[in-house]
Image (cartoon, rainbow, N blue to C red):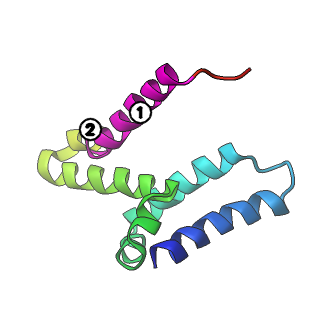
């Protein structure tokens, strides 16, 4: 199911870019997926997709929006209004740090062409 859900999410993004020619860029898809994941998560509609698709729903960009929203909601319950400012970043900190560290290591190890 992870492959199917993740594939459908990627297919939707690719179709949007292909059918709109040059008006929708990958940057638009990135922002749109994160925003859609956050909004759907806030409405309680994204968690059922995560339950069905597992990593197929949490690894794509919409899963990042879901993670930010769930972290924020949990922090607001625990810390009140101040949790709204820190909860999303706290929830996503490990993934963000891993991306930075591995990106740096790859840049150090490999020599770019160009």
Q: Is residue 35 left or right of residue 10?
A: left
Q: What SS does tag 1 mark? A: helix
34 w.r.t. 86: above or below? below
Q: Which residue is mark 1?
A: 102
Residue 12, percent across and down? Answer: 67, 67
* Magenta stretch in the rendered image: 87-110
106 w.r.t. 40: above or below? above
Sequence-wise first label, 2 or 1: 2
Residue 108, percent across and down? Answer: 48, 20
Which of 56/112 is in front? 112
Residue count near mark 1 (Cα–Cα under 10 Å), binned few <14, some 14–19, many ≥20: few
User: Is 91 included in the stretch rendered in magenta?
Assistant: yes
Could you tell me if the residues under marks 2 and 1 are in contact, i.e. CB atoms within 8 Å? no
Residue located 38% across and 71% down the image? 54
Residue located 58% across and 47% down the image? 31
Q: What SS does tag 2 mark? A: helix
Residue located 32% across and 44% down the image? 92
Quadrant placement of the C terminus:
top right
Main SS of the magenta part reads helix
Q: Is residue 88 left or right of residue 63?
A: left
Which of 68/97 is in front? 97
User: Is 103 included in the stretch rendered in magenta?
Assistant: yes
Residue 16, percent across and down? Answer: 75, 62
Which of 66/55 is in front? 55
Residue 86: give its label: 2
Residue count near mark 2 (Cα–Cα under 10 Å), binned few <14, some 14–19, many ≥20: some
């Amino acid at each position: 199911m992870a492959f199917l859900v993740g594939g459908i999410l990627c297919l939707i993004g690719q179709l949007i870019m292909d059918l709109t020619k040059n008006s929708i860029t990958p940057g638009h898809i990135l922002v749109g997926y994160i925003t859609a994941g956050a909004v759907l998560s806030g409405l309680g509609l994204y968690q059922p997709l995560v339950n069905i698709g597992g990593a197929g729903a949490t690894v794509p960009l919409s899963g990042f929006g879901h993670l930010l929203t769930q972290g924020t909601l949990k922090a607001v319950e625990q810390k009140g209004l101040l949790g709204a400012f820190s909860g999303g970043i706290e929830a996503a900190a490990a993934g963000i740090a891993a991306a930075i560290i591995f990106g740096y290591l790859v840049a150090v190890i490999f020599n770019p062409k160009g």
